[in-house]
Amino acid sequence: MTSVNDLSSPVTGPWPDHIAGLLGGAMKRLRLEILDTSEENFPGLRVSHYRLLELIPPEGARITDLAEVAGMTKQGLGQHVDYLQKLGYTESDRLSGDRRVRLVRRTARGEEAVAFSVAAIERVEEIWAERLGPERYDVLRATLRELGG
């Protein structure tokens, strides 16, 4: 298996040469970096699980609110939360005032998983900043922030 940490080699594609394809190639790099040692550290997690864990605020959040932020249905998000809870990354409780509402929080293990994925993303950012140079990398970040916001 080739190391995904060598981000200088091209990602196997073929990726179309339009913006969606180019962004897809960049996202593939990020996913590979996150998943490189994920299974040995955090068994059963996929990139979508790391993303969801990162979206949960420290005080917790309602399933409905998380689903809206994640762009998922409540049912789909609830299935992810159930899976993460089964693996020990989240916990949830029903609100005493309204038993229909489920409040989700990260466990200590969930916090570790978030730190792991953030560190993987930071490694990619460092490599890309070195490769592009600080000025071009800053422009890339500012441009993506503008386009996404």
Image: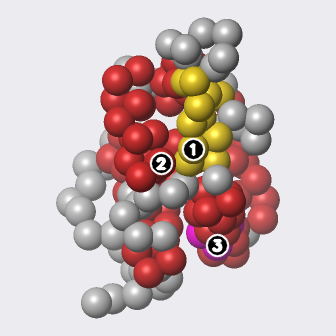
Alpha carbon distance from label 2 to label 3:
28 Å
- 113 in relation to 61, above or below: below
Q: Amino acid at mark 1?
A: Glu
The image's mark for residue 85 is 2
From the image, tell me which residue sits under label 3.
123
Q: Amino acid at mark 2?
A: Gln
Find residue 72 and report its image quarter: top left
Which secondary structure lies at badge 3? helix
x 28%, y 90%: residue: 1
Q: Dot 1 surroundings within 10 Å: few (below 14), some, or many (20 or more)?
A: some
Q: Which mark is first along the chain, 1 or 2?
A: 2
x 57%, y 24%: residue: 94
Find residue 60 and report its image quarter: top right
Alpha carbon distance from label 2 to label 1:
5 Å
Alpha carbon distance from label 1 to label 3:
29 Å
Taking the image as shown, residue 54 lies to the left or right of residue 26, namely right
